[in-house]
Image (spheres, rainbow, N blue to C red):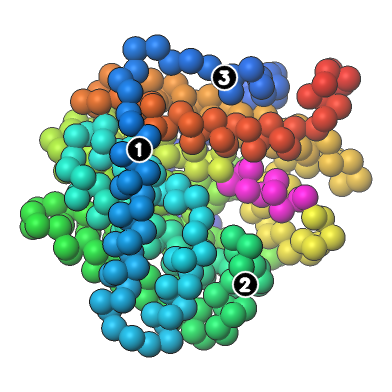
Amino acid sequence: MTAEVLYKKLLSGTVERTLAMNSSCEQNAPDNNRFSWEYPNRRPVKKERVARELQKTRMLMLETLRNLGPGPAQTAGLYQIETGGSMLRARLALASGIAFERSSRYRIVCAAACEFIHNASLIHDDLMDRDESRRGFASVWKKFGEDLALCTGDLLVCAAFAVASELDDPGEAQRLTRLLATRSSRIILGQSIEVDGCAEHCSPGLRDYLQATTAKTAPLIEMSLLTGVISTNSENAVVERVGELASAIGLAYQIIDDLDDLRDPDANAGRLHAFHASHHHGRGSRNDPAPLKRRATWHADAAMKRARNILDQLDELAPQALAPLMLPLISRLEQRNWDHFPSALRNGAIS
């Protein structure tokens, strides 16, 4: 199947919403004051509970890997997990489980499964992108070799399904397994667009860029956020809102991640693929990065504004408010985005 056909099949409807969302984004610069917004009438969630469940999630991941049996891939997998990371996908799964009143055991299993898929994708991404470090440590392929990195990524995918099978309720296990399979497939299809041979010679338009960017990033976020939803009798409206929230956060995340690549332009010279944000926000600015950063940060900001609006809608549908756990994550993205906003514009020197 060609990349052009995949463009049309992946995430139908998402691109149209995103294009509409971005149509007026350049009219408003990011507002740094929003980082301290207060949200009244939100039921408090104890941070200590989340911290404890994150720790239990990490322990479950290590235990699951060890139980799969000894071998070089297991050693490399344990190495990858022990490098740490923000565990964003685990946090999203825990937030979803709390909002939809799932048990602690269910939340932790879902968080571990999502983190396994995420780490598998990182191992394969680092190999494809030839990134030699991850989280301040040597990447798996750099430390253990390319072939073993492929095996390790595959093993972590298997570990995700292994931990999902540990749920006591067969129905819950089946629904979680189906969610892992469908969203992981979408991640792979989205990534395949980027690495397709024609991508090196084509010049995808904005619609293609948005579709490919959302396709490879949003499904993993959506997977995490849906873990709490699939175990309930939630209406389709909830599932749709979660998908829209994931698309908005995923687009913003990928734009900001691409901007991080530009911090060291010499190191990334010639390595930015056709679907990199720099090619779609840098019109006429090859020698001046300020316009590129301005457009990219405004687009990311527009996506996060949309995420906040959708989050408000979800809070009316979920048994417990999702915002208390989601807003800090969105705020961190907003701060990362703001850090990329051209300083001259940030200080009001340029209109």
* x and y, in percent, of residue 64 in the image: 28, 70
Query: What secondary structure is marked by label 2?
Result: strand
Per the image, the residue denoted by label 1 is 48
**In the image, residue 258 lies in the stretch drawn in magenta:** yes
- The residue positioned 73% from the left and 47% from the top of the image is 278
Q: Answer with mark 3 or mark 2, whichever residue precedes in sequence.
A: 3
Per the image, the residue denoted by label 2 is 138
Q: Answer with mark 3 or mark 1, whichever residue precedes in sequence.
A: 3
- State the mark number for residue 149: none
Q: Is residue 134 above or below residue 19?
A: below
Per the image, the residue denoted by label 3 is 36
Q: Is residue 165 above or below residue 287?
A: below
Judging depth in this view, the residue of 260 and 64 nearest the camera is 64
The answer to which image quadrant residue 78 occupies is bottom left
Question: What distance separates the C-alpha of mark 3 from that of mark 2?
Answer: 36 Å
Is residue 49 visible in the rendered image? The answer is: yes
* x and y, in percent, of residue 272 in the image: 72, 59
* x and y, in percent, of residue 218 in the image: 45, 46
